[in-house]
């Protein structure tokens, strides 16, 4: 049994790197009945690697394979059906959690370098959901990382945002390591995949390419570790250490978008930090720029959190979380409750989403203080949205 002091210490260790990931999907809201497949590495990065003549051929092939897999799993956006992912927040309120589970229920699999058709793979660890583990923690290094850090992430969301697992209802966590697929060994990504059965979704982590990008459960290690940092002291990096070559500090720099990586003659961070540099892209390029243009709202969060001071999850994080779960955010990409399929209309509305989301964050900031409203408003003005 752990006491509250131990729990607080564990939650603090998730620090800003956990709340950072809350901001990553500010533009990823889906209408009810559709579930989106999210991957961590932008498609343009994998394309840059696959097209480069300055790296080994086998590394290029792994990038090309990973890029092809992204296209395949994104079909889940229109083909997979499921319920809405968790309850929505009322204005100015963090929603109450569902029934608190007696224990986190993790099920970890070894995908054994197989593709998505054979997920989840071979069972390596399973909890019984009562707090009593019927088997020992896994020995595989990747599975051990998953085992440790999903606990921290789960505890953080339950404690800070009162969210009981990813769906708000205590859903099981099904996770596969060593995801791959033919031809050749290696996979440069990690992703979440909607499994077409109630109460289940699938996380999968690749092993990298062993030359340019590292194992992606190492990415989770960086994401969930470290001591508590106040907003002004944080490095605001996401995916720190994933690059094995000089020029790559991380996958994202939330404070300074566009500076996370610059691998000479291979690939460069394209994230803009201001609306003046917003990229109006077709769906075929980074799925409309969802990874690229997220640099703008990411920077807003940093500016707001630093202006408010303290730990980023105390005020800024709760404002953003309540805004992300606000049902009004979904309305811009739907018509009469159904998703908008026309790409031209989607592109027209994409840029408008920034203003819609800005208004929501200001609305939710009013529940905290006038200083919060000022900090959030000034942050959006600082990137040219307001």
Image (spheres, rainbow, N blue to C red):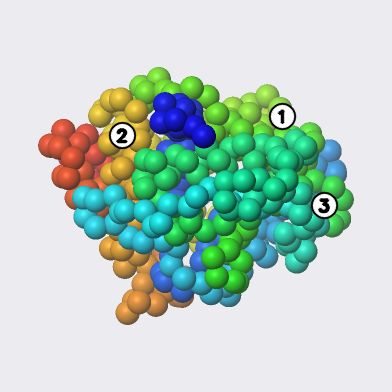
Mark in the foreground, 3 or 1: 3
Q: In which quarter of the image is residue 84?
A: bottom left
- Which structural element holds mark 3? loop
Viewed as shown, does residue 40 lie left or right of 217? left
Whether residue 317 is visible here, answered yes or no, is yes
Percent position of residue 245, x then y: 71, 27
Cα separation between marks 3 and 1: 23 Å
Q: Name the residue under label 2.
A: 314
Mark 2–mark 1 contact, CB under 8 Å? no
Viewer-closest of 155 and 16: 155
Q: Name the residue under label 3.
A: 112
The disc at residue 244 is 1
Disc nearer the start of the sequence (3/1): 3
Mark in the foreground, 2 or 1: 2
Cα separation between marks 3 and 2: 40 Å
Residue furthest to the top: 233
């Amino acid at each position: 049994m752990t006491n509250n002091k131990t729990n607080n210490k564990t939650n603090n260790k998730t620090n800003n790197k956990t709340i950072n990931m809350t901001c990553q999907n500010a533009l990823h809201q889906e209408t009810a009945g559709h579930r989106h497949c999210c991957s961590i590495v932008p498609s343009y990065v994998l394309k840059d690697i696959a097209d480069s003549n300055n790296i080994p051929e086998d590394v290029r092939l792994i990038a090309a394979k990973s890029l092809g897999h992204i296209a395949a799993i994104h079909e889940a956006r229109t083909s997979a059906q499921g319920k809405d992912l968790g309850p929505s927040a009322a204005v100015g309120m963090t929603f109450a959690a569902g029934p608190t589970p007696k224990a986190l229920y993790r099920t970890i699999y070894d995908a054994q370098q197989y593709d998505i058709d054979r997920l989840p793979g071979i069972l390596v660890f399973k909890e019984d959901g009562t707090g009593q583990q019927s088997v020992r923690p896994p020995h595989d290094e990747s599975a051990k990382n998953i085992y440790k850090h999903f606990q921290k992430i789960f505890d953080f969301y339950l404690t800070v945002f009162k969210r009981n697992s990813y769906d708000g209802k205590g859903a099981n966590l099904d996770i596969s390591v060593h995801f791959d697929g033919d031809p050749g060994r290696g996979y440069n990504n990690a992703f979440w995949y909607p499994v077409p059965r109630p109460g289940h979704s699938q996380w999968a982590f690749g092993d990298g390419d062993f030359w340019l990008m590292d194992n992606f459960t190492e990415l989770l290690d960086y994401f969930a570790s470290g001591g508590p940092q106040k907003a002004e002291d944080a490095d605001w990096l996401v995916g720190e250490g994933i690059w094995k070559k000089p020029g790559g500090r991380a996958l994202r720099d939330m404070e300074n978008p566009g500076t996370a990586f610059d691998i000479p003659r291979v690939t460069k961070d394209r994230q803009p930090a201001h609306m003046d540099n917003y990229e109006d892209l077709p769906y075929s390029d980074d799925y409309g720029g969802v990874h690229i243009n997220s640099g703008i709202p990411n920077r807003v969060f940093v500016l707001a959190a630093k202006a408010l001071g303290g730990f980023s999850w105390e005020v800024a994080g709760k404002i953003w979380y309540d805004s992300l779960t606000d049902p009004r955010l979904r309305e811009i990409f739907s018509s009469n409750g159904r998703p908008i399929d026309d790409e031209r209309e989607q592109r027209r509305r994409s840029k408008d989403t920034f203003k819609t989301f800005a208004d929501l964050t200001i609305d939710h900031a009013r529940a905290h203080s006038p200083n919060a409203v000022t900090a959030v408003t000034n942050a959006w003005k600082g990137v040219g949205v307001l």
